[in-house]
Image: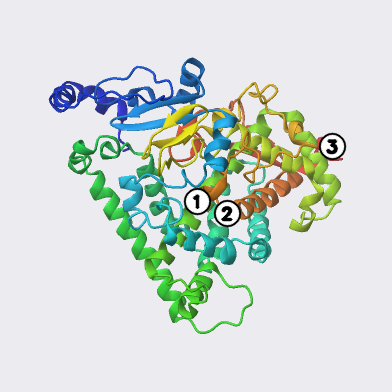
């Protein structure tokens, strides 16, 4: 069961208050810096109590009162939150080098070989080399294209599964999760692994990353995390994860030399390590960290995006019909829309962009940390300050977007705005040195799956069921309840046809 932050804070408040008074009695100092406006905070916990139930929504609401640049205190840690496109550009472009570091998060570190992966690692030579290997050798456009057949195969299998349901109620969320798991397994690890083999590990990682760690924000109370078993759970999960990836590596090392042209990502990483072709010594734990980054991020964020997109299409029949008509025009009666035809579907791309705008998978991106003092938009940001960019709030800013709460894919038609990190009003994958290197891989999966789902089926809600939009907030923001639908073959509906 996940840790309840509010229950902990209020049940422990009397003891924590006494400890705070003793600690702060001798440590009162004032700063003459021009710091961003800061809302009132409670002793010891600062503004942590204001983060429930969803931090991205809470921070958006606070920004409407205190401004788009706020200084908060999460325990003893100063955190500056940017909810403005100008601020996002300053952090991720103008001062990108200064803010390219990551704060060390205890639980995240335990699950990523002491934060020596790509996502959570501190900025430095090792991180730069590992990211370079990923971008050039694992996630280049050519490499992503080489796995086209894998994506098409798994999409066809999902379509057959839906067809075999014979218009009974299906859990579309579960089918999407299975598909993304299978694609990542085949691309990264070389073969499918039964979902149960990795599901417990991935679910555990997601749960623990979403858990509140006292030590991250009140270091001198970090012992509480140990007492309540958070460290033990993280260490046990880290061992399970390491055992799994070690088994994958040994399987690859023991197999006979293959002459198959399409190598999986483990093959490529082992080859780089063996040949030392980059001039950088790629250690075994680095290979494991990269693989788990690919697997975790590739599965979770991709399936989340597809789930929210299909939810919005169910809520907006006009958009669904228009997308189906585009699919029928491109498909021309064939059994499948191949990946090569996706570029003929501008409305499909607009639908996915609009979904990413409204439902940014990681709404606060991943926190950054300043490596030296810098002035941003007139405010002093001290060295060592954590920085959060509320990409979700910026993507719903009414001063930037017309009717920002509405699902309107048309806003992206004939628009240069894209998600690749150069338009700071729309950064679902981040921008600058720390942007997600797997953008291309994620989006080609989203496109091929969505195109063929709407091409083959008309979706409806079963019986009297409504469409619950409640969020399940964690490291990524999922739908709390799965998408349950009845899928009718599209040829039975004139509305599907162009």
Q: Which mark is residue 494?
A: 3
Q: Label 1 to label 2, Cα distance in Å?
A: 9 Å
- Cβ atoms under marks 1 and 2 closer than 8 Å: yes
User: Disc 1 vs disc 2: which is toward the camera?
Assistant: 2
What residue is at 34 percent from the left and 65 percent from the top?
243
Residue 263 in percent (x, y) is at 58, 73
182 vs 366, nearest the viewer: 366
Residue 37 in percent (x, y) is at 43, 20
Q: Residues within 10 Å of mark 2 (few under 14, many from 20)?
A: some
Quadrant containing the N terminus is: top left
| Nearest to N terminus: mark 1 or mark 3 | 1
Left or right: 121, with 43 as reference point = right
Left or right: 334, with 8 as reference point = right
What residue is at 27 percent from the left and 53 percent from the top?
235
Q: Which residue is mark 1?
A: 297
Q: Which mark is residue 438?
A: 2
Residue 401 in percent (x, y) is at 68, 25
Q: Is residue 170 visible?
A: no
């Amino acid at each position: 069961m996940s840790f309840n932050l509010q229950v902990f804070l209020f049940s422990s408040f009397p003891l924590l208050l006494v400890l705070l008074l003793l600690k702060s009695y001798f440590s009162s100092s004032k700063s003459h810096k021009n710091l961003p406006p800061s809302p009132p905070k409670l002793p010891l916990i600062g503004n942590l109590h204001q983060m429930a139930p969803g931090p991205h929504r809470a921070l958006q609401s606070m920004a409407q009162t205190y401004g788009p640049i706020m200084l908060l205190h999460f325990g003893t840690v100063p955190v500056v939150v940017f909810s403005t496109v100008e601020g996002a550009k300053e952090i991720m472009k103008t001062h990108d080098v200064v803010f390219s570091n990551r704060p060390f998060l205890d639980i995240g570190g335990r699950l990523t070989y002491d934060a020596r992966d790509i996502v959570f690692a501190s900025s430095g030579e090792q991180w730069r080399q590992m990211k370079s290997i990923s971008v050039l050798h694992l996630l280049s456009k050519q490499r992503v294209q080489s796995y086209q057949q894998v994506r098409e195969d798994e999409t066809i299998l999902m379509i057959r599964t839906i067809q075999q349901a014979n218009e009974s109620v299906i859990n579309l969320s579960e089918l999407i999760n299975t598909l993304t798991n299978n694609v990542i397994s085949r691309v990264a690890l070389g073969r499918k692994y039964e979902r149960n083999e990795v599901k417990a590990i991935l679910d555990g990682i997601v749960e623990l990353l979403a858990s509140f760690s006292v030590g991250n924000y009140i270091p001198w109370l970090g012992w509480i995390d140990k007492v309540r078993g958070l460290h033990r759970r993280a260490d046990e999960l880290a061992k399970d994860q390491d055992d799994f990836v070690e088994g994958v590596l040994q399987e690859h090392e023991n197999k006979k030399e293959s002459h198959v042209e399409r190598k999986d990502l483990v093959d490529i990483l082992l080859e780089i390590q063996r040949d030392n072709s980059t001039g950088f010594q790629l250690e075994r734990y680095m290979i494991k960290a990269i693989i788990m980054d690919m697997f975790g991020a590739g599965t979770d964020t991709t399936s989340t995006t597809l789930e929210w997109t299909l939810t919005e299409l169910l809520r907006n029949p006009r958009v669904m019909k228009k997308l189906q008509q585009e699919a029928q025009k491109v498909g021309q009666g064939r059994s499948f829309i191949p990946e090569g035809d996706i570029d003929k579907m501008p409305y499909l791309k607009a639908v996915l962009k609009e979904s990413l705008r409204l439902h940014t998978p990681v709404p606060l991106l991943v926190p950054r940390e300043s490596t030296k003092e810098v002035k941003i938009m007139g405010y002093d940001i001290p060295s060592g300050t954590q920085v959060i960019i509320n990409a979700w709030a910026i993507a719903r800013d009414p001063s930037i977007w017309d009717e920002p709460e509405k699902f309107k894919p048309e806003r992206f038609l004939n628009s240069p705005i894209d998600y690749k990190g150069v338009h700071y009003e729309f950064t679902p994958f981040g921008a600058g040195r720390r942007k997600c290197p797997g953008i291309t891989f994620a989006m080609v999966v989203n496109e091929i799956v969505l195109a063929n789902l709407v091409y083959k089926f008309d979706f409806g809600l079963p019986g009297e069921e409504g469409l619950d939009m409640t969020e399940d907030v964690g490291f990524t923001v999922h739908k709390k309840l799965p998408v349950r639908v009845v899928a009718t073959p599209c040829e039975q509906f004139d509305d599907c046809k162009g």
